[in-house]
Amino acid sequence: KNLLSERINKLQTSATLAMAAKARALKAEGKDIISLSLGEPDFNTPDFIKEAAIQAINDNYTSYPPVDGYPALKEAIAGKFKRDNNLTYSTAQIVVSTGAKQALANAALVCINPGDEVILPCPYWVSYRDIVKIAEGVPVEVQTSIENDFKITPEQLEAAITPKTKMLWYSSPCNPSGSIYSKEELRALADVLQKHPDIIVVSDEIYEHINFVGGHVSMAQFEDMYNRTITVNGVSKAFAMTGWRIGYIGAPEAIAKACTKMQGQITSGANSIAQQATIAAVSAPVSKIKYMVDEFKERRTLILNLLNSIEGFNCNNPEGAFYVFPNVAALFGKTFNGKTIQNASDLSMYLLEEANVATVTGEAFGNPDCIRLSYAASKEEITTAINRIKKALS
Ligand code: PLP
């Protein structure tokens, strides 16, 4: 008998983590590697959040918390949904999880039957495809174009829907493209879904606050979508809390209950100290984290200017998150030291080896013509890294 299950053998290793491992290995050899591959803010968690965690330890928040989260945290999240998104969720509709990643996994495991199709507009966040596969769903990738700012059109959505379609998953602001769906664009997608009332939407809004143009829109704000949208959010990105592992959903009550049942058998409630710290994070005025968003905005301008000076890189104008996702197809077919760069993975590897800059291949995000660079790095690192890339490509 095989040692491991078919389930795990079918799963891919996260490409971002694989790249990080390769970069670490080169670093260990003494190479000066600049990593633009990671999806985490390079800021420390703000002090007011850390203090809330220290207080929680001293107040002995050290026992098993409720599976779906402390009532006080769920109240605070309900307040955040109302304040930032004009969404009314009762605490019974909110589930706190170990990161938005677990929230997404719960959503997949409680909604998807084997063979159900899940529409994933490309580029999508790396883990969507494999989370859907773990739930035995079928990821249906829909290619978008840089001309349309990497957003799915209503026509494309309509064409992708079949009798087996169960869900549509997207992130806005998008990791990796930085694209943000406007109200009109989301309404047009909702209009298509009108004809398909059984399709559930997962709206991943974890980059909500890292938005340089304003006007964040939640799918659930549309009355006709509210009862079939799972709004996913978390504190990892905007509050520089990746290691604290807190994410959450607002959803129809039956789905929230099912997610609680699911995680009750797998992890129980999310970390008690981190939950208490999250009360401070989500209750604080958004102005408290503006300094990080302002810094990301400056870095975006910097990295775009530098990248646009490189022949063969074609960038959209990311409006949020902290990534750029240039189309690099113009470089395919070029040869270096007898090796031909055939795709984004080859280019990403070439940049690691020749420029000592770690990026992530777009293949991981369902778009093999692009690479992703994160600008959650200092301006100095960004400047050095992109200059090195330019030199390596010239
Ligand atoms: N959704 C998107 C779009 C992300 O980029 C990430 C993290 O990279 C997550 C979800 C997961 O976040 P968390 O750290 O809360 O699990």
Image: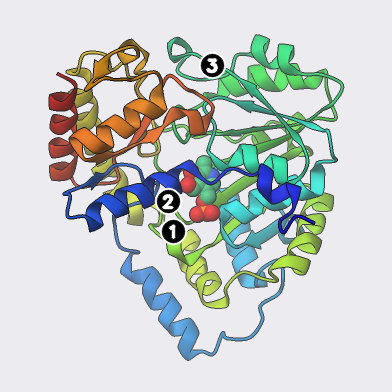
Judged by depth in the image, the label closer to the viewer, 3 or 2, is: 3
Residue at left offset 53%, top offset 74%: 276
- Dividing the image into 4 quarters, which one contains the N terminus? bottom right
Mark 2 Cβ and ligand 1 under 8 Å apart: yes
Answer above or below: position of 231 versus 173: below
Instruction: Judge left or right: residue 114 versus residue 368.
Output: right
Query: Which element is circle 2 on?
Result: loop
Answer above or below: position of 166 versus 369: below
Residue at left offset 87%, top offset 21%: 163
- Mark 3 lies on residue: 144
- Mark 2 lies on residue: 237
Q: Earlier in the sequence, mark 1 or mark 2?
A: 2
Judged by depth in the image, the label closer to the viewer, 1 or 2, is: 1
- Mark 1 lies on residue: 242
Query: Measured from the top left, where is residue 346 in percent x and y?
Result: 36, 27
Q: Earlier in the sequence, mark 3 or mark 2?
A: 3
Instruction: Judge left or right: residue 52 versus residue 260.
Output: left
- Taking depth in this image into account, of 267 and 393 the one nearest to the observer is 393
State how far apart marks 1 and 2 are (Cα): 7 Å
The answer to whether residue 95 is visible is yes
Q: Are marks 1 and 2 in contact (CB under 8 Å)?
A: yes
Query: Measured from the top left, where is residue 267 in percent x and y?
Result: 68, 68
Q: Amino acid at mark 2?
A: Lys
Q: Residues within 10 Å of mark 2 (few under 14, many from 20)?
A: many
- Dividing the image into 4 quarters, which one contains the C terminus? top left
The label shown at residue 251 is none
Q: Quadrant of residue 27?
A: bottom left
Q: Earlier in the sequence, mark 1 or mark 3?
A: 3
Query: Measured from the top left, where is residue 111 in percent x and y?
Result: 81, 44
- Taking depth in this image into account, of 374 and 26 the one nearest to the observer is 26
Query: Measured from the top left, where is residue 84 in percent x and y?
Result: 52, 46
Mark 1 Cβ and ligand 1 under 8 Å apart: yes
